[in-house]
Amino acid sequence: MWSYFLKRLGIAVLVIIAVSIISFVLLRLSGDLARDLAGEDATPAQVEQIEKLYGLDKPLYVQYFDWAFKALKGDLGRSLYSNEPVFNLILSRLGVTALLAVLGLGVAVVVAVPLGVFAAVYRNSWIDRCSLGLAVFGSAIPNFWFALILIYFFSVKLRWLPITGSESWAHFVLPTITLSTMVMPQIMRLTRGGMIEALDSEYVKMAWAKGLGPGVVFFKHALRNAVLPVVALAAVSLGFLLGGSVIVEAVFSLNGIGSLAYESIRRADFPIVQSILFMLSFSYVLLTLLADLINARLDPRIRLH
């Protein structure tokens, strides 16, 4: 187990380094940052002064190493717009985004896994067709449009739930439902496929031959093996939801990481954008590593690869 862990950890570290380099370079090449900061009417002398002030006149690799060494010490720089520490700005918004992502993933799993199980058990029936139809609908519908539909019915017409804000649990109901549709179809389809494969396996047929009840066969034998890829997908989905909540936060006016990233991009506040990209990439890789370790724990055969 330790050798498998060290191997996966080494790969994760390399991926994080590669992603940080690529995101840093792409951000610097996205435009003339010094010109954007100085303004359209700035003189060449003022642009040059901005470059020296923020170290933009240094070679790109020097800029990267300066940023990386400071980031390892917890110094993510200061906002070019408010001059506040970037770390504090991200930390103040992280709770809303993390809570929204966890709730969205929880709703997706609670709904999608049972649907996938029933669709597999009653394959080619109306239950299976309805489940697949819901999966296609969830994949095809734009999130912002679905959010507006929810707002129209549950907030404007019925007046059951608030539209904006994050003061109480009620403010997170509609954003959570909207965000969960981003990953619910994938989880449902993967559960269904895993259950169908498990139900057709020899060990499940042996369980039926022993006279075991449907509950034991479906949940103890079939679902335990079918859920292995779902664990990995759930972890990856959590990282995806952390970075994919920009539209949802914008529609429901939630002050999370997504809205902070959108504001920073508009203001060309690249220290915040760079830090958010790194944080989301780090979270994504870390969650993927965690999923690999959980799968290896549940299925020892994975450690052999």
Image: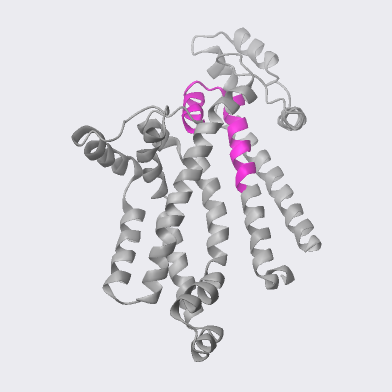
Q: Position of residue 210 (x, y in %)?
A: 53, 90
> Magenta residues: mostly which secondary structure?
helix
Percent across and percent down for residue 242 are: 52, 41
Answer whether residue 131 is visible to the viewer in this image: yes
Question: Is 189 placed left or right of 68 in the picture?
Answer: left
Residue furthest out toward the left: 157
The vertical placement of 222 against 253, above or below, is below
* Count of numbered marks: 0
Q: Residue at x 70, y 51 (%)?
A: 12
- Residue 186 appears at what percent x and percent y? 44, 59
In the image, taking residue 86 as reference, residue 5 lies left or right, namely right
Q: Nearer the viewer, residue 47 or 186?
A: 186
The stretch in magenta equals 257-284
Q: Residue at the location (35% across, 33% down)?
A: 251
Q: Residue at x 68, y 49 (%)?
A: 15
Q: Please identify the quadrant where the N terminus is shown.
A: bottom right
Q: Residue furthest right?
A: 3
In front of the other: 90 or 98: 98
**Which residue, as the protein is rendered here, is positioned at the far bottom?**
209
Q: Is residue 125 left or right of residue 71?
A: left
Q: Is residue 18 magenta?
A: no
Res. 38 image quadrant: top right
The quarter of the displayed image where residue 171 is located: top left
* Position of residue 184 measured from the top left corner of the image (x, y, whole percent): 41, 55
The quadrant of the rendering that contains the C terminus is bottom right
Q: Residue at x 42, y 27 (%)?
A: 167
Residue 266 lies in the magenta-colored region: yes
In this orientation, does residue 183 appear? Answer: no
Asked if residue 154 is positioned above or below residue 219 in the image, the reply reads above
